Image (cartoon, rainbow, N blue to C red):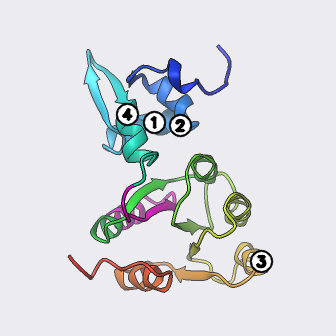
Amino acid sequence: MTDQPLPEQSLPELMTVKETSEYLRIPLPTVYYLVQRGQLPAVQIGGRWRIKRSLLDRDVLHKEEQAGQPTVMVVDDDPALQALFKQFLKKAGFGRLVVGTGTEAINLAKKQKFDLVFLDLKLPDVPGDEVYSQLKALHPDLPIVIITGYPDSKVLSRILSHGPVTVIQKPLEYDQLNQAVKQLGHKGSAEGV
């Protein structure tokens, strides 16, 4: 078996975790993690997880465009911040994907267009400025909001050399997220909740 992604027509409707990993081009442990947290449309059959491809396409990859619902990717490896973002973005009515590594973010950006990205600068695998550059290379008009606990870092300086960028300092608060989202032309979570 090669490491090539599986062609869509050869994939079953109920995919194994391994097939899902290849289909999404994300590491196997990440698929297990997302399944266990209920972030992928999965069912257990005979003690093994199966992921429904049609729901994955619709809900996760957004192949069928959702009317007016902006999609947001959050790139941060802090579980507490991930939970805050999920809660905030759900209330704001955003489709959302939360990932913990730069590699996952870049792979998802190759498969899907996002309306907004929240990017932490300190990631476990790839420096934040490298992720920023790769995301901008894939989607030059993509709004990226930087989240950092280190506003004086060299990584942030390298990003700022590309031009103006919205930066939110940690610890994050709902008001800061609302403000950033509104600045970029989306309604925040305080409205319509």
Question: Which image quarter holds the C terminus?
Answer: bottom left
The amino acid marked with disc number 1 is Val
Q: Which mark is residue 31?
A: 1
First in sequence, mark 3 or 4: give its number.
4
Which x, y percent locates residue 2?
68, 18
Which x, y percent locates residue 59?
37, 46
The residue that label 2 is drawn on is 24
Q: Do residues under tags 1 and 2 come within 8 Å of each other at their CB atoms?
A: yes
Q: Which mark is residue 6?
A: none
First in sequence, mark 4 or 2: give its number.
2
Gap in angstroms between the C-alphas marked 3 and 4 = 39 Å
Query: Magenta region: which residues?
Result: 66-86
Q: Do residues under tags 3 and 4 come within 8 Å of each other at their CB atoms?
A: no
Which x, y percent locates residue 109?
60, 53
Q: Do residues under tags 4 and 2 come within 8 Å of each other at their CB atoms?
A: no
The residue that label 3 is drawn on is 162
The amino acid marked with disc number 2 is Leu
- Judged left or right of residue 2, residue 84 is left
The mark closer to the camera, 1 or 4, is: 4
Gap in angstroms between the C-alphas marked 4 and 2 = 13 Å
Residue at disc 1, secondary structure? helix
Q: Is residue 75 a member of the stretch shown in magenta?
A: yes
Gap in angstroms between the C-alphas marked 3 and 1 = 34 Å
Residue at disc 3, secondary structure? loop
